[in-house]
Amino acid sequence: MRLTPVGVVRSPLTDAGEAPKQGDEGAPEAMIVLDEGFLPALDGVAPGQAVLVLTWLDRADREVLAVPPRSDRTRTLTGVFATRSPDRPNPIGLHRVEIVAVDGAELRVRHLEALDGTPVVDIKPVLGADPADR
Amino acid sequence: MRLTPVGVVRSPLTDAGEAPKQGDEGAPEAMIVLDEGFLPALDGVAPGQAVLVLTWLDRADREVLAVPPRSDRTRTLTGVFATRSPDRPNPIGLHRVEIVAVDGAELRVRHLEALDGTPVVDIKPVLGADPADR
């Protein structure tokens, strides 16, 4: 169960304290730069689509099992499986982004709150209402 | 970037050919049996909730970069990042399920199409409209 990075996030966000907690809370545009070898896996990914980007949150603490929601210490500790905290046993980030442009193996995206340098491990389409499109 | 299993899927589904392609296409009820050590991470997870279950699709082919959508060979090959194929460089399964019951470290869920024995690596809440609940 070992993950292979397929690319990396390039973003103006470099500090976890400054990053929005979710991508639709003010994340700047960012790039997903895939390794060229994965170019065939991008066939069918196009501007205007909403996709799910899975990342490896390499700055997370994997020993943490409970956190205050949204890092608000006035709130009761909650199990990490009931939160989106990056600190969790397997720190896989799940980000719903909108594709602005595709240039070879580089995707320009909106609403990605991952930090610069975060490894990308997968991209999946958002499931629509029509099973034929899944 | 090594994943640690936090639990396992227990399901009547044992054969990929018989499993529905998506959980809302007829998956039977299933159990997620977590290792007891992760019980604190479940605090706040309750019946009636919709959650995202992340699995490791251990029967997937990681060398595949393009597939016919929904295994329909009459359709044009598409990059795996534009499909939900289990065959992909990092075979992380993403399943939206509904929690029916919680009993200690065991969750009974609806709409999970993963096969019996599939390792579970993470559980995340579905993001709602209210950021305070995220």
Image (spheres, coloured by chain):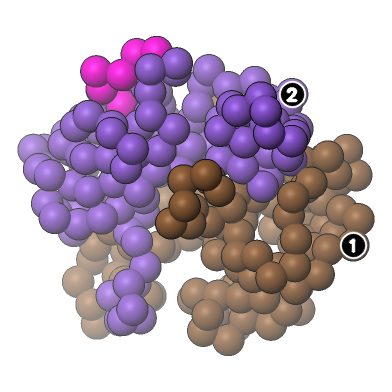
Chain colours: A purple, B brown
Q: Which mark is residue B103?
A: 1
Tell me if residue A14 is in the magenta stretch. Answer: yes
**Which residue is denoted by mark 2 in the rendering?**
A63
Q: Position of residue A100 (x, y in %)?
A: 12, 44
Residue visible at 8% across and 38% down in the picture? A103
Secondary structure of residue under mark 1:
strand
Q: Amino acid at mark 1?
A: Asp
Tell me if residue A49 is in the magenta stretch. Answer: no
Image quadrant where one finds the N terminus of chain A: top right
Q: Amino acid at mark 2?
A: Glu
Q: Are marks 1 and 2 in contact (CB under 8 Å)?
A: no
Secondary structure of residue under mark 2:
loop
Marks 1 and 2 on same chain = no
- In this rendering, the answer to whether A105 lies above or below B73 is above
- In this rendering, the answer to whether B4 lies above or below B29 is above
In the picture, measured across the screen, residue B36 lies left or right of residue A113, that is: right
Asked if residue A88 can be seen in this view, the reply is: no
Q: CA distance from mark 1 to mark 2?
A: 23 Å
In the picture, measured across the screen, residue A5 lies left or right of residue B9, that is: left
Name the dominant secondary structure of the magenta segment: loop
Q: Which residues are magenta?
A: A6-15
